[in-house]
């Protein structure tokens, strides 16, 4: 089969390799669709500090089970499934404290290589994080389970249920997913603040009325006006730049919560006005990855169509055009690209 490998930053090579075979407890999936993701793009551009090259990319995937490993009873050959690329151990100190997203196994044993015809799903993922895909959910939509799991996890870190004003900063897939989850959980108003009109149009198509391009109108002024001078109850940063982190904190109102969802480049710093954190009791939190309950809830949102990922997957390309898929995503012309072998 063909597999796409990153041989050095910016260079992908297609290699012929043997089709994977499942070990005990494992599955092999014939890939229908794998989505591009910000992590792939960053890795493509600069490599990954923890993952040596040549590196097979692709981790947001869904397909049909081609082979079932010894001891797997929940799945059969021919089942349509979706999965996320990690699972926590469930037993370490962090897992026991309910912090599965921080489990060393979750991030340390990442399933990659789904930009390929077949991908092998390790046993620890098969055990908890593989789901049968119903007919009404398209394969490329089911492949969005991973980013939605991250978003569900992030939503658990804040109190959307009593927020009257929620500001989402960003217009990528994460921002558009977060806005949809916030709409389900919060009785309040939601403002989406991005920089790309084509992406903000998708937000409008998803039914969001308050959508603003902050390259024209500044973020501070926009939020001040939109909240009647109060500042926002909740601010979610979905960009991942220190200057945007700082801007996010600055537009929260007294008692506000700020969720830093976008990861910044390593070794960067952001500064915050101490008086806002002290006198205004602004809570600043991060969110990273997901636990098993997040994945289960995300799957239910997808399956029951409470969250619509279809409009976020703006392009589809064959695997042989993977470079074009990355280019589309990088140029912001695409939000997510579904890559099919
Ligand atoms: Zn991803
Ligand atoms: Zn653990």
Image (cartoon, grey):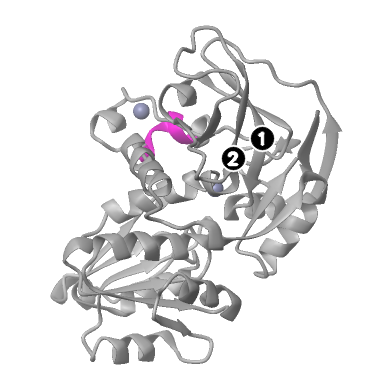
| Residue drawn at 44 percent across, 31 percent down | 129
Observer able to see residue 10: no
Of 245 and 221, nearer the camera is 221
Depth check, front residue: 263 or 317? 317
Give neighbour class at mark 2: few <14, some 14-19, many 20+ (Cα, 10 Å). many
Residue stretch rendered in magenta on the structure:
101-107
On screen, residue 295 above or below 324:
above
Is there a contact, CB below 8 Å, between mark 2 and mark 1?
yes
Disc 1 crowd rating (10 Å Cα; few below 14, some 14-19, many 20+) is many
Tag 2 residue: 61
**Residue at point 31%, 80% (across, down):** 251
Q: Position of residue 239 (x, y in %)?
A: 49, 67
The residue at 54%/49% (across/down) is: 141
Instruction: Judge: label 2 CB < 8 Å from ligand 1.
Output: no
Residue tagged 1: 31
Tell me the quarter of the picture where residue 167 sits: bottom left
**Image quadrant occupied by the C terminus:** top right
Q: Is residue 133 left or right of residue 5?
A: left
Q: Position of residue 286 (x, y in %)?
A: 35, 56
């Amino acid at each position: 089969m063909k597999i796409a490998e990153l041989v050095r930053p910016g260079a992908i090579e297609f290699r012929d390799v043997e089709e994977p075979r499942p070990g005990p407890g494992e599955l092999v999936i014939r890939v229908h669709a794998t989505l591009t993701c910000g992590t792939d793009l960053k890795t493509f551009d600069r490599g990954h500090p923890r993952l040596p090259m040549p590196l097979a990319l692709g981790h947001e995937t869904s397909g049909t089970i081609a082979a079932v490993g010894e001891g797997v009873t929940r799945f059969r050959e021919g089942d349509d499934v979706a999965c996320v690329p990690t699972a926590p151990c469930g037993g370490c100190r962090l897992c026991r404290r309910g912090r599965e997203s921080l489990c060393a196994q979750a991030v340390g044993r990442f399933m990659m290589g789904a930009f390929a015809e077949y991908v092998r799903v390790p046993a620890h993922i098969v055990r908890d994080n593989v789901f049968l895909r119903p007919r009404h959910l398209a394969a490329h939509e089911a492949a969005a389970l991973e980013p939605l799991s991250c978003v569900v996890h992030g939503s658990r870190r804040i109190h959307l249920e009593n927020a009257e004003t929620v500001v989402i900063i960003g217009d990528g897939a994460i921002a558009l997913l977060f806005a949809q989850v916030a709409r389900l959980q919060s009785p309040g108003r939601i403002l989406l603040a991005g920089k790309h009109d084509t992406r903000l149009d998708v937000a409008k198509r998803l039914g969001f009325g308050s959508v603003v391009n902050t390259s024209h109108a500044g973020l501070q002024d926009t939020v001040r006006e939109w909240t009647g001078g109060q500042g926002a109850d909740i601010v979610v940063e979905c960009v991942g730049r220190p200057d945007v982190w700082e801007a996010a904190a600055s537009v929260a109102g007294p008692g506000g919560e700020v969720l830093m969802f976008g990861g910044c480049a390593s070794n960067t710093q952001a500064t915050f006005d101490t008086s806002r954190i002290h006198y205004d009791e602004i809570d600043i939190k991060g969110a990273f990855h997901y636990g098993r309950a997040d994945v289960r809830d995300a799957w239910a949102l997808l399956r029951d169509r409470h969250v619509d990922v279809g409009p976020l997957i703006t392009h589809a390309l064959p695997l042989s055009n993977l470079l074009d898929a990355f280019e589309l995503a990088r140029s912001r012309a695409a939000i997510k690209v579904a890559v099919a072998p």
